[in-house]
Image (spheres, rainbow, N blue to C red):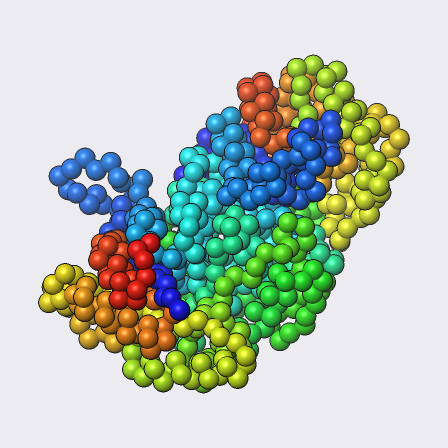
């Protein structure tokens, strides 16, 4: 069994992204004494592309674009990256409340065609009802799970069959399904998340990957998923979401994390390369198949992880260098 | 808006990206590009080399066309959306970073996305492309095709929905503060795009639809009213009707025409290509075009010409340099322009005199013809007949 490493692209909460967004035309110049040619020509996306390229160059396995209400739409971000990043898997996070399941499925098919089947979905809706209503989504909290399942049923139906009809509580389709070169494409690798018994039971039935966030009782949560999955005769991968700050000197890593306001974050991995390599191997032995990492200093950390941490992990796991 | 026709005196020319394959010559519509047809000798299907995947795909062909269009003088191109096509959002996102000026006109049916999510996706595309996206909003069509998309609303209901959709789309983007809306189809509570996204330009809207319900919706939100080419007296009547309807609401709207062109150095060569294409069609292909589809009023208006019943290509010449058999050669509108470079330009000038402010042009094959039309026809369009519109303010 091996472990894979995905990088979560910097989003609206990233300090560099915010700084580059301030270069937009109409804002005051950032460099008061300089003739600043960037003004109106660059934005945070130019930085995000560099992070994505970096992740590819240092041998990550995939990228995840998040779905923050304050940030960009993941599908567009990944589409714009897809031709610059040629090997990495591309996982788009969005809510089943964003629109029609058929329409989402059709986008997925075009993505698969253009990217060589590298496209995945992470389906999530906010727990916060007021936040959902700000996004035009008025489905009640108690119905989110049923909607997600209805969404997956329809999307899978039209991708995997040529004549699919379904009349569900949230989505319906009559004689749907893709034809010709749009048919026969794999359904996007499906990541679901959540800690509730209901979330875990759903992933056991539907998900290719279930994502937990680093924190208390991880082993127990993994065990619950494995049990439920084995009852369903399935074996979804376990992904672990964590924020990471590494350094050759562990004290310096913890200092950087503190400066970023993460000192007490339960999902934080901070430490020296050796410490973190041991930690990651331990988590892997606990059952984590995929690490979904992010960092307040995205570009720098991609390189630190790729150059220093991953080689140590591979060595500890007895794998050859990439 | 950075790209909107700031010069009120100029005409907006767009090209078209073929989203379900292309044909390599109008003389032989069976000769194809893309993976929508069986691969035969001479057909091009990007992505396969000696039958094996080679790492490229149809998007590489679309990239070629987009670059050809932008270097040849087109502002951008329409990206159509049908059940058999690739998706316009995905195409635009993939091409945003490798084009410089090409504006992506996404064909979009408002029912398919939640309006707030659509605003967020659009604003992200504006950020990624530098404000180069705009919409061709489509509402009609329908019948069984609409259920294929998972959309259950009836024809006229859909226009009400489009209006609500655009109210919210604009409200969360350019509203003064958090936006509330309680509509029949859509609701939002305290919705607002984040400031970095809201700072981008609101996409221009080209609006299609020939029914009364469509015109009502267009008059409220569209920047351009887009029509397929029809006989010129009908074009004039339609444009007058939409402008009148819009003026009643205190807004102004511009008009645009979507039309294919076969332009050659001489008129004889152009008609020779039409003849060759027409005569290469088998009866089964013509039969396929006899079936009318959906409850679209625009389609019925065009289907009145019955191109599939014609015995000779000449039967479909409905006016000098206008041929009503284009739908036999490829999917889409029936009436197009055929002639010398000068005649093609003159037809466009005539349409400008009837009220056209913009065009979406297309030719087969889309790559080579983007160069040809850009090099040979566009420079001959004078725009001189353009109706004086002094005092016209940008619609927004």
Give coordinates of residue B109: x percent, y percent: 60, 54
Side of B190 relative to B351 (left or right): left
The answer to whether residue A280 of the structure is visible from this angle is yes
Vertical position of residue B353 compared to residue B45: above or below: above
Image quadrant in which the C terminus of chain A is located: bottom left
Q: Residue at x 59, y 48 (%)?
A: B86
Q: Nearer the viewer, residue B249 or B225?
A: B225
Q: Is residue A199 left or right of residue A245?
A: right
The picture places residue A192, in percent across and down from the top left corner, at 46, 71
Q: Please report the residue visible at 56 percent of the width from the left and 62 percent of the height from the top.
A: A187
Examine the rendered structure and indicate whether residue B227 appears above or below residue B216: above
Q: Nearer the viewer, residue A2 or B389?
A: A2
Whole-percent x, y for residue B64 in the image: 52, 33
Q: Report whether B284 appears left or right of B183.
A: right
- What is the tally of numbered marks visible in this picture? 0
Of the 4 image quadrants, the one containing the N terminus of chain A is bottom left
Residue drawn at x 33%, y 72% is A284
Query: Vertical placement of B47 versus B232: above or below?
Result: below
| Residue at 23% from the left image edge and 67% from the top image edge | A277
- Judge whether residue A48 can be spotted in this image: no
When the figure is inspected, residue A24 is found, relative to residue A306, above or below; the finding is above
Left or right relative to A102: residue A17: left
Q: In which image quadrant can residue B78 be found?
A: top right
């Amino acid at each position: 069994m091996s472990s894979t490493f995905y990088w979560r692209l910097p989003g609206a909460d990233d300090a560099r992204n915010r700084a580059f967004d301030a270069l937009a035309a109409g804002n005051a110049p950032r460099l008061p004494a300089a003739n600043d040619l960037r003004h109106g020509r660059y934005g945070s996306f130019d930085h995000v592309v560099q992070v994505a390229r970096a992740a590819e160059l240092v041998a990550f396995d995939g990228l995840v674009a998040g779905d923050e209400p304050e940030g960009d739409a993941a599908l567009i971000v990944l589409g714009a990256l897809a031709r610059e990043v040629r090997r990495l898997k591309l996982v788009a996070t969005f809510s089943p409340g964003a629109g029609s399941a058929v329409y989402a499925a059709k986008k997925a098919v075009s993505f698969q065609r253009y990217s060589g089947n590298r496209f995945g979905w992470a389906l999530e809706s906010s727990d916060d009802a007021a936040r959902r209503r700000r996004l035009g989504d008025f489905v009640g909290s108690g119905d989110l799970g049923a909607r997600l399942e209805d969404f997956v049923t329809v999307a899978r139906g039209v991708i995997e069959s040529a004549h699919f009809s379904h009349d569900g509580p949230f989505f319906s389709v009559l004689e749907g399904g893709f034809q010709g070169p749009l048919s026969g494409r794999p359904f996007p690798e499906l990541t679901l998340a959540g800690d509730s018994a209901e979330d875990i039971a759903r992933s056991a039935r539907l998900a290719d990957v279930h994502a937990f966030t680093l924190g208390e009782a991880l082993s127990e949560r993994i065990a619950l998923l494995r049990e439920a999955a084995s009852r369903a005769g399935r074996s979804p991968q376990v992904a672990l979401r964590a924020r990471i700050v590494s350094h050759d000197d562990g004290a310096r890593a913890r200092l950087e994390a503190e400066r970023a306001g993460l000192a007490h974050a339960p999902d934080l991995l901070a430490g020296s390369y050796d410490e973190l390599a041991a930690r990651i191997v331990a988590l892997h032995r606990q059952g984590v198949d995929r690490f979904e990492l992010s960092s307040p200093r995205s570009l720098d950390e991609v390189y630190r992880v790729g150059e220093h941490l991953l080689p140590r992990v591979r060595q500890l796991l007895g794998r050859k260098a990439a | 808006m950075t790209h909107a026709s700031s010069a009120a005196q100029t005409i907006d020319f767009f090209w078209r990206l073929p989203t379900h394959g292309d044909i390599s010559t109008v003389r032989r519509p069976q000769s194809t590009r893309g993976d929508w047809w069986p691969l035969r000798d001479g057909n091009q299907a990007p992505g396969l080399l000696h039958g094996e995947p080679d790492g490229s795909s149809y998007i590489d062909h679309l990239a070629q066309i987009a670059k050809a269009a932008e270097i040849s003088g087109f502002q951008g191109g329409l990206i159509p959306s049908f059940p058999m096509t690739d998706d316009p959002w995905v195409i635009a996102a993939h091409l945003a970073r490798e084009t410089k000026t090409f504006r992506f006109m996404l064909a979009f049916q408002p029912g398919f996305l939640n309006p707030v999510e659509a605003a967020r996706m659009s604003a992200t595309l504006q950020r990624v492309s530098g404000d180069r996206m705009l919409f061709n909003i489509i509402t009609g069509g329908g019948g069984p095709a609409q259920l294929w998309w998972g959309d259950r609303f009836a024809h006229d209901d859909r226009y009400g929905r489009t209006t609500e959709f655009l109210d919210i789309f604009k409200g969360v983007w350019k509203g003064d503060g958090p936006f509330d809306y309680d509509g029949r189809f859509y609701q939002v509570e305290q919705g607002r795009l984040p400031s970095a996204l809201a700072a981008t330009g609101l996409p221009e809207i080209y609006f299609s639809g020939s029914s009364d319900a469509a015109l009502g919706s267009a008059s409220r939100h569209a920047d351009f009213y887009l029509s397929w080419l029809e006989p010129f007296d009908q074009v004039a009547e339609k444009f007058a009707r939409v402008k009148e309807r819009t003026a009643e609401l205190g807004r102004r709207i511009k008009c645009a025409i979507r039309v294919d062109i076969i332009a050659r150095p001489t008129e004889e060569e152009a008609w020779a290509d039409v003849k060759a294409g027409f005569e290469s069609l088998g009866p089964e292909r013509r039969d396929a075009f006899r079936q009318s589809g959906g409850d679209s009023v625009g389609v019925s208006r065009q289907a009145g010409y019955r191109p599939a019943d014609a015995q000779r290509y000449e039967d479909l010449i409905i006016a000098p340099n206008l041929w009503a058999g284009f739908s036999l050669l490829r999917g889409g509108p029936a009436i197009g322009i055929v002639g010398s470079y000068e005649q093609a330009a003159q037809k466009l000038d005539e349409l400008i005199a009837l009220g056209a402010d913009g065009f979406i042009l297309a030719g087969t094959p889309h790559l080579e013809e983007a160069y040809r039309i850009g090099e040979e026809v566009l420079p001959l369009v004078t725009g001189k007949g353009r109706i004086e519109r002094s005092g016209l303010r940008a619609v927004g």
